[in-house]
Image: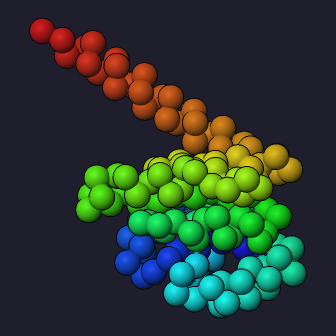
């Protein structure tokens, strides 16, 4: 089984999910992608979650659903592993649909991260609690990011008029 399961509400979320997948791959984290809707295929979603929960191989779920984000709440209410909601931005609603990800009922607590790569990083950090090798891969990625910023500043200073 995968360390991370990415659940999307529909195939239209695939380009967004691809960004999450690429970031997970960059850190060497196994994942699966699934399509299930809390609104359109609730029984199917619950059956998938029961299967994953029964195997015990999922460390983190990342949910990707826009508009009325019932997917994240439904997943979080039915699993014991952490859930990260990463809803894609919708210009149709000028971002107002994000509120459905931010306000959940009591007892339902998915984290909300809006950037796909950041959602993957949070998943990695959660998994790294018990994995020294993954902690080192995260630290290496952070060092590379820091070095890139410092290099950009040095280039800017060297090319100042």
Of 19 and 40, the residue lying toward us: 40
**Residue visible at 58% across and 79% down in the picture:** 38
- Residue 157 coordinates in the image, percent (x, y): 27, 12
Task: Name, please, the residue furthest toward the front.
Answer: 105
Is residue 161 something one can see in this rendering?
Answer: yes
Quadrant location, the N terminus: bottom right
Residue 44, placed above or below residue 62: below
Task: Name, please, the residue furthest toward the left.
Answer: 161
**Residue visible at 86% across and 74% down in the picture:** 56
Is residue 22 something one can see in this rendering?
Answer: no
**Residue visible at 52% across and 36% down in the picture:** 144
Q: Is residue 69 left or right of residue 108?
A: left
Q: Is residue 17 left or right of residue 104?
A: left
Of 145 and 109, the residue lying toward us: 109
**Residue visible at 52% across and 87% down in the picture:** 40
- Residue 139 coordinates in the image, percent (x, y): 66, 38
- Residue 95 coordinates in the image, percent (x, y): 35, 52
Residue 145, placed above or below residue 82: above
Of 51 and 143, the residue lying toward us: 51
Quadrant location, the C terminus: top left
Of 134 and 85, the residue lying toward us: 85
């Amino acid at each position: 089984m995968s360390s991370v399961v990415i659940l999307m509400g529909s195939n239209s979320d695939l380009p967004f999910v691809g960004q999450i997948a690429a970031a997970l791959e960059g850190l060497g984290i196994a994942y699966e992608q699934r399509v299930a809707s809390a609104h359109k295929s609730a029984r199917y979603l619950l059956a998938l979650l029961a299967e994953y929960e029964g195997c015990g191989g999922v460390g983190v779920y990342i949910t990707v659903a826009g508009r009325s984000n019932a997917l994240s709440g439904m997943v979080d209410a039915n699993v014991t592993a952490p859930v990260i909601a990463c809803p894609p931005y919708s210009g149709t609603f000028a971002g107002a649909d994000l509120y459905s990800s931010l306000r959940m009922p009591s007892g339902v607590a998915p984290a909300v991260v809006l950037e796909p790569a950041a959602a993957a990083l949070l998943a990695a950090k959660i998994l790294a609690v018990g994995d020294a090798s993954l902690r080192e891969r995260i630290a290496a990625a952070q060092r590379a990011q820091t070095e890139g910023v410092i290099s950009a500043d040095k280039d800017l200073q060297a090319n100042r008029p």
